[in-house]
Amino acid sequence: MKAIRRFTVRTVLPEPIAGLGTLAANLRWSWHEPTARLFRDLDPVEWEAAHEDPVALLGRFDRARLDVLAADADFVSRVQSQVEDLRRYLERPRWYQGLDGSAPRSIAYFSPEYGITAALPQYSGGLGILAGDHLKTASDLGVPIVGVGLLYQAGYFKQSLSRDAWQQETYPILDPHGLPLSLLREEDGTPAVVSLPLPGDRQLRAQIWRADVGRVPLLLLDADIPTNDDAARAVTDRLYGGGGDHRLQQELLLGMGGVKALRAFERLTGAAAPEVFHTNEGHAGFLGVERIRELMDGGLSWAEALAAVRASTVFTTHTPVPAGIDRFESLQVGHFLRAGLAPGVPVDGILGLGAENYPGGDPATFNMAVMGLRLAQRANGVAKLHGRVSRGMFSGLWTGFDVDEVPIASVTNGVHVPTWVDPQVLAFARRQFGDEAVEAGEWGRATDVPDEDLWALRRNLRVQLIEDVRARLRSSWLKRGATESELGWTRSVLDPDVLTMGFARRVPTYKRLTLMLRDPDRLKALLLHPTRPIQIVIAGKSHPADEAGKKMIQDLVRFTDDPEVRHRIVFLPNYDMRMARTLFPGCDVWLNNPLRPLEACGTSGMKAAINGGLNLSVLDGWWDEMFDGDNGWAIPTAPPGASVEQRDDLEAAALYALIENNVAPRFYGAEDSGAAGAAGPSQAEYDGVPRQWVRMIKHTLAHLGPQVAATRMVRDYVNQLYVPAAGSGRAAAADGHAGARALAEYTGRIRASWPGVVVEHVDSVGISEQPRIGDEFRVNTYVRLDGLAPEDIAVQAVHGSVLESDELVGTVVSDLSPAEDLGNGRHLFTGTLTLERPGAFGYGVRVVPRHPALTSDAELGLVANAGDS
C-alpha cells in the first residue's frame, strides 16, 4: 500500500545536546571539518547511510540513543564547543567589516541553482557550484549577501545506467521539512507567501524557505503549496526540467517573486534592504522589472526607474555561446506580462529590454541575457578569455564601438577552498605551515615540504579515491543488472601506484567527453603500457533532453566495459558533490578538452589544483590565463579553418602525445632516473619519488592555489563591482532620486538628438613629410551637435597602429577640447596628438555621450564616427 500522505517528524533533542540542532541547521557544517567530524563520530556507518546529512542523521536516532549521548559529558562538551565556535564565526567582524562606508550594507545575489552540499541537491553543474562557493566565501569574508533562488521538488535528477550503458534519469521527490531549511513565517506563524498573477485569472504563489549558509541567508521559493492549482504547483518541480511556459514561469518567479521574497524577509527579520543586486546569469533577469515596478509605484517614470535600477545592478554572464542563453518568443513574454505582473509598467518597455533588435538578432525573440545586460550598469564574464568572447558575442548591443570597448569586464571564478580541499590535505598543511598560514590561504611554504612527505600524501589520496571508486562501480553494475558473482573483478579496479587521471563535468557535446576515444587503440596502449600505465576515472551527467550527450556517455561506458581495460578506466554514474570531494583530491592529473573558446571558466581543474593535482587542458576558460608551464600541460588546439574531423584528430593526437611523452614519464620518475630522452642528469638514481613531478605539485600549491581561491574572486567582486554599484545606486537614489531623474532626462535628450550628431570634417595640422617618433600634430574636428551642448558629449581621437585594411589596433583614446562655437549647432574641437611608435599610424575621430553617472563612453551604445553617412 502507498501512503496517501507523507510528512517528516523532527527529532526533539535533549537539552544538553540541543546545540546539535543549531549546528545541523546551519550549512557551515558542509565546509567546517570539526563540525562535520562531530556528526560523523556519532555513528560513522549511519553518517554514510544518511549521505553525510546531519538532519537526516539525527532523524535516525531514537530517544534512548539521544539520552545516552546527552549523558556523555565529553560529547556534551564537544557540542558546546562547536556551538560556541559557530557563534563566534557568525558574530565576529571579518574582512568585509574592515572596509569603509562605501561598501554596500547588503547585496542580493540571484541564481537559478545553488551547489551548497549534496544534502541540498539544488544544482546541476558549474553555475550552481559557483553560486554555492560564492555564498560560502561571502560568509567567510563577512560580505553581507542574501541569496535568492528556487526550491525544486526533485532537484536536478539522479543518473543511473541501463545494461546497454544508456543514461537513465529518476527524480526522487524531496521533502523540505527533512532538509536543513526553515520556513519564513509571518508574525502569526503562518508561512510568508509571495504571489504573481498569471494569465487566465490564475495565481502563482510561493512560500519561502530559508537556508543558513554560515552568515549568509539563502531564500528559496517553493510553489508546491496547496493554494496553487496543479499547474502552478509544478512550476518548481525540477531544475531545468521544462521549456516554454514552464521555464518562463520559473524565471518570472525567480526574478520578480525573488524580489518580493526579499521584501518579506526584510519586513519580518529587520534585515537591511540590498543596495546592490547581482544577477547570476540571465535566468533571474526579471528581478529588474519588479524593482522598476516598485520605483514607479513610488512616483518615478519608466525612464527614471530604469536608470535607478541599472545603477545598482550587476550582471554576470556564464555562457560563451548563444545556444546557452534562454530565449522566449516576445509574444509569449508579453502574454504573461499583460496578466498584471507589473501593473503600471509599460509592457512594450519591458519587451524592449530583451529584444534582439540589433544586427544578427531576431526581433521576435526575447533574450534573457540581453535583458540582463540592459538592466545592469555593470557586467562581467567569468574568466579573462570569456570576457573577450562575451564582448564579441554581445557587441551588437554597442554597434559602432570596437569589440574591446564593449562594457563587459571579467572576474575569473574561484573555488571555496574549505569545501574542496581534502581533510588530509588540510591536516597536512596545518602540520607543515601552521593554522594561521592555512586560514590566510598562504601556502607559499609548500616549496619547503619534504618531497617524500608530499608524495606519500598524494598516494594516500589516490588510495582513498580507489576505495570509493570500487564501491561505486560495484553499486552501478548491480543497478545495471549484474549479479554479485559477476563482480569479483571490481575489487581490484585501479591501482594505487598508477598515474590517475580524472575527467568529470556536465556532458554537452562541446566538452568532448569522448575525445579520448578518438583512437581507441592508442588509448588502450596508454592504459596498458607495461611500465608507465595510466588509469582514468570519469563521471558526468547529460541533460535529459540531450540525446547526443547521452550517446557520448554510452560510447564511453561501452569502452570501459571491455574486460581488457575495465581495471584501468571507469565511468561513475550520478556525479554529485559527494563524489567530487573524493575524486578531485585523488586524481594526479585533471583532464579538460573542450572546444576552445566554449568553456566559460570551468572550475573543476581548480579543485584538483588546491589538492596538489596537475592540469592537462586545452587553453580555455581559467586555464588560458593561469597556465604557466610549471602547473600542468596545455593541449595544443587546431589552427583556424580546420574541419571538425581534422580538429578532433589533431587535438586527440596532441593529447595522446602529451600523456605518453611528457606526463607519464615525469610521473614515473623517468626524468629523475635519466631514462632515454629525459631532461634530468644522465646518471641520476631514481629513489621512488618523482622529484620533478613533486616540484610541479609544490609550485601548483604555492602559486596557483591563491589565484583559484574564491576569496580572491569575491574580493574582486566587492572591489570592482559591488562597491562601485553601491556608489552609483546611492547617487541615483539621493534627494528623492534626483540623480536617476537627471540621468533619465539626459539619456532621453541624447537619444532624441543623436541622429543629428555628425562629424562634418576633420583636418590635421603639423604633420611633416617624414614624421618621426615624438612629433606632434594638431587634430581639428568640426561637429554638428543638433541642439546638444559640448558638455553633453566628448569628441575623441582614436589613434594607434593601422593595418592594411585600415583597421586600428593598439589604440589610445584622447579627448579633444571644445575650441569655438561656430553657430547653428556647429562646434570646433581640437587637440594635439604625439607619434609614439614607429610603423603605420592612423587615427579616427568620433563623438560619444559623456555624463558623470555613466560608467563608460560605450554605455548608451551611441557613437557618431567620422565618415559615417
Image (spheres, rainbow, N blue to C red):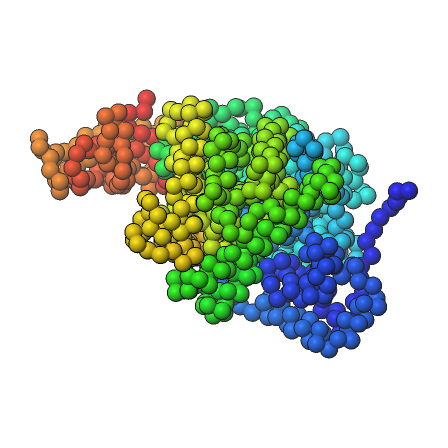
Q: Is residue 110 left or right of residue 98?
A: right
Q: Is residue 391 left or right of residue 345?
A: left
Kindly indicate the quadrant of the structure image that contains residue 33. bottom right
Count of all numbered marks drawn on residues in the image: 0
Image coordinates of residue 707 in percent, x first then y, are 43, 54
Residue at the extreme right of the image, as rendered: 1
Image coordinates of residue 288 in percent, x first then y, are 57, 42
Q: In the depicted view, which residue is nearer to us: 777 or 69?
A: 69
In this rendering, the answer to whether 541 lies above or below 362 is: below
Q: In the depicted view, which residue is nearer to us: 789 or 758?
A: 758
Image coordinates of residue 191 in percent, x first then y, are 77, 52
Image point (55%, 61%), residue name? 424
Q: Is residue 189 left or right of residue 863?
A: right
In this rendering, the answer to whether 726 lies above or below 508 is: below
Kindly indicate the quadrant of the structure image that contains residue 340. top right
In this rendering, the answer to whether 26 lies above or below 330 is: below
Image point (81%, 53%), residue name? 8
Residue at the extreme bottom of the image, as rendered: 73
